[in-house]
Amino acid sequence: MDEAVISRYLISDLHIQILKCSQIDFMSGYLDHYITGMVETVPPESFDDVKTTISFAALLAVFMPSDGILAFTISIPNKKRKIFCLFDNSSGKFVARSHFWNAGDFEKDQRMAVQRVSVSRKLDHISMVDCKNEADCNEGVSDLFRKYLETQDNSRYDFFLKDSELILVKYDGETGSGSFDSIMADIMALPEKYMNSGTLFREYRFSFLCGCNGDRMISMLSRMPEDDIDYIFENENEVSIECPRCGKNYKVQKNEIKKD
């Protein structure tokens, strides 16, 4: 079962927070539509985008209130992919999906939508950022992340990947000074120095919530032709079906399958 573990460090004298998350190796990258169609895996050229997007959302989720929910959707037309992830602070769960997507003529730009919801703070806010042309988005999803961070509060943010860990830096000092740029360069060179000198404020854990259930498995079988169903059961009254995304096993009775 996948788990996101985020370490949050406070360096008070520098007005800096550092958040670290090992890139989440997401369940071999199975697509969301395996319930209604053939099982397909995310191609290798898109898998890094999936891992980075989920890990980046995990880092931002810790800034949400305790009942907060953060949802990301990223459209990548040139790779025919959409990536979705949602982090729920109240339950400590996250959901992640990737699926095949043929963009329409009006959807050629790489785009990211972020929704933040909190009942206690009466927050329901959606941000949208996109890359209008290739020059705006030379580094793919990383540029979308940076564009989104620019729309946030008066703090400054930056992030980088080192040794398979995504590290996000939040700076709450005077944005007019050049101190952040020099500190950021030093953090990128040796992040351990800063994390060891800071205070580990909290460690956050989110566990993966697949969303599969017995009803969805029965629904999948119900869409199959009668001959295929007979072949699967092979004169037995029960079969075991394993979810390809989380590995959970379901027992399905043949008389539970309803054909229209």
Image: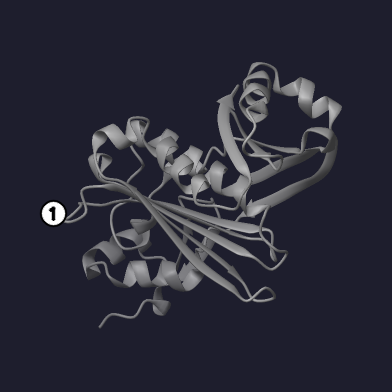
Residue pictured at 84% horizontal, 34% vertical: 13
The residue positioned farthest toward the top in the image shown: 189
**Mark 1 packing: few (<14 Cα in 10 Å), some, or many (20+)?**
few
In terms of depth relative to the viewer, which is nearer, 112 or 158? 158
Locate residue 163, reporting x and y percent.
60, 21
Residue pictured at 62% horizontal, 76% vertical: 122
In terms of depth relative to the viewer, which is nearer, 137 or 226? 137
Q: In the rendered image, which quarter is residue 68 located in? A: bottom right
Locate residue 206, reporting x and y percent.
67, 52
Q: Is residue 62 left or right of residue 200?
A: left
Image quadrant where one finds the C terminus: bottom left
Locate residue 193, reporting x and y percent.
78, 20
Secondary structure under badge 1?
loop
Q: Which residue is mark 1?
A: 105
Residue pictured at 42% horizontal, 78% vertical: 256
Q: Is residue 75 left or right of residue 171?
A: left
Q: Is residue 223 left or right of residue 257?
A: left
Q: Is residue 196 depicted above or below 61 in this figure?
A: above
Residue 28 visible, this angle: no
Label 1 sits on what residue type?
Answer: Asp
In terms of depth relative to the viewer, which is nearer, 232 or 119? 119
Locate residue 107, reporting x and y percent.
21, 54
Residue pictured at 67% horizontal, 54% vertical: 63
